Image (spheres, grey):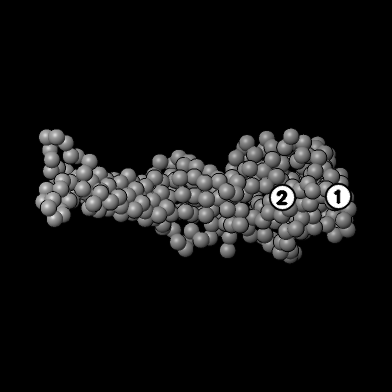
Amino acid sequence: MFVDEARVLLSAGKGGDGCLSFHREKFMPKGGPDGGDGGKGGDVILLCDSNLGDLIQYRFTPQARAENGQPGMGAQKHGANGSDCILKVPEGIVVQNIETGNMACELLRSGERVILLMGGSGGKGNMNFKSSTNQAPRRTIPGSIGESGEFLFILKTIADVGLVGLPNSGKSSLISLITNAKQKIGAYPFTTIWPKVGMLQFGGSSESISIADIPGIGKDAHRDKGLGLRFLRHIERCNVLLFLIDMAGTDDRSPVDDYQTLISEIRHYDRSLLDKNRILVANKIDMDQARANLEEFKKIIDQDLIETSCETGQGIDQLIDILRKTVIKNNN
């Protein structure tokens, strides 16, 4: 199970109440007020952790709260502060306040910390209100309520390259061939049912880039057919989009129609995604009808493309070289 969206109900801790107390000791019958302050309520803190890959833990535990502060005590003793509630989240998470609809925060890199909800402040004990005109104050201030709210956690994958294509275009084969990701491969649609990120390591150097494999986009995905468009959020942060087109015309599809379908569906989701750098790949070039389909494709789609075959390895080195140059140029 891959979970990239979760609703959570969170509460920071309440501040401890101030104490009403008077000092009592032998030979000091009127020792005066000595009620201490309450402790601060714990905060709700988000901690970005690269070891997490999705939000599955929040599917089963959708509520969390920080500890309340302890009340003040006599002898001017301060109540203990409540423990913070630290929630670990994966890289690339966006936190949306459900009540307001506004983005509360986002965490992109491991180790980042954000205080999402502040704990309530501790109350004041009666020792704070002694004065020359009020030697025995009975006034205290209770601790304040901590912040709370319902939030939507949304995971958006962080990757250099987003790999998009229709079902059976060969995305799983390609990412398994050129990266360390081992995707399920099969001759049927939707072998990829959730996003997967793989690292492409360039031989002879320490350089590498990340590639996100997005589940196949079908026609009318924007109308929630097939897997819909929900996984397209995972290419929003990609700098480069790699369009993988099946030149063999699997399932009697037209490569031209496939490409135009991808463009149309992405435009329905977010037109700005089409402003990203694109690499167009004509895949399965070794199969029957691929050459004829390629010639027809070139007549209609006037763009540079790379011819590849995951079966024979044709064009794979060229693709890796172009990925390296494109991503590094874009990052600089």
User: Which quarter of the picture shows residue 286?
Assistant: bottom right
Q: Residues within 10 Å of mark 1 (few under 14, many from 20)?
A: few
What is the spatial separation of the Cα atoms under label 2 and label 1, in whole angstroms?
A: 19 Å
At x 23%, y 46%, the residue is 125
User: Which quarter of the picture shows residue 67?
Assistant: bottom left
Q: Is residue 45 left or right of residue 258?
A: left
Q: Residues within 10 Å of mark 2 (few under 14, many from 20)?
A: many
Query: Between residues 70 and 161, which one lies in front from this camera angle?
Result: 70
Query: Between residues 22 and 104, which one lies in front from this camera angle?
Result: 22
Of circles 2 and 1, the one toward us is 1
Determine the secondary structure under disc 1.
loop
At x 53%, y 53%, the residue is 89
Query: Between residues 293 and 277, which one lies in front from this camera angle?
Result: 277
**2 or 1: tag closer to the N-terminus:** 1
Q: Which residue is mark 2?
A: 211
Q: Is residue 133 left or right of residue 243?
A: left
Q: Which residue is mark 1?
A: 204
Q: Say above or below: 12 vs 105.
A: below
Question: In the rendered structure, which amino acid carries the disc numbered 1?
Answer: Gly
At x 48%, y 60%, the residue is 59
Residue 312 at x, y = what percent?
88, 58
Residue 235 at x, y = what percent?
64, 46
Question: In the rendered structure, which amino acid carries the disc numbered 2?
Answer: Ile
Q: Say above or below: 130 vs 307.
A: above
Residue 203 at x, y = what percent?
84, 51
Locate the C terminus and report the quarter of the image it occupies.
top right
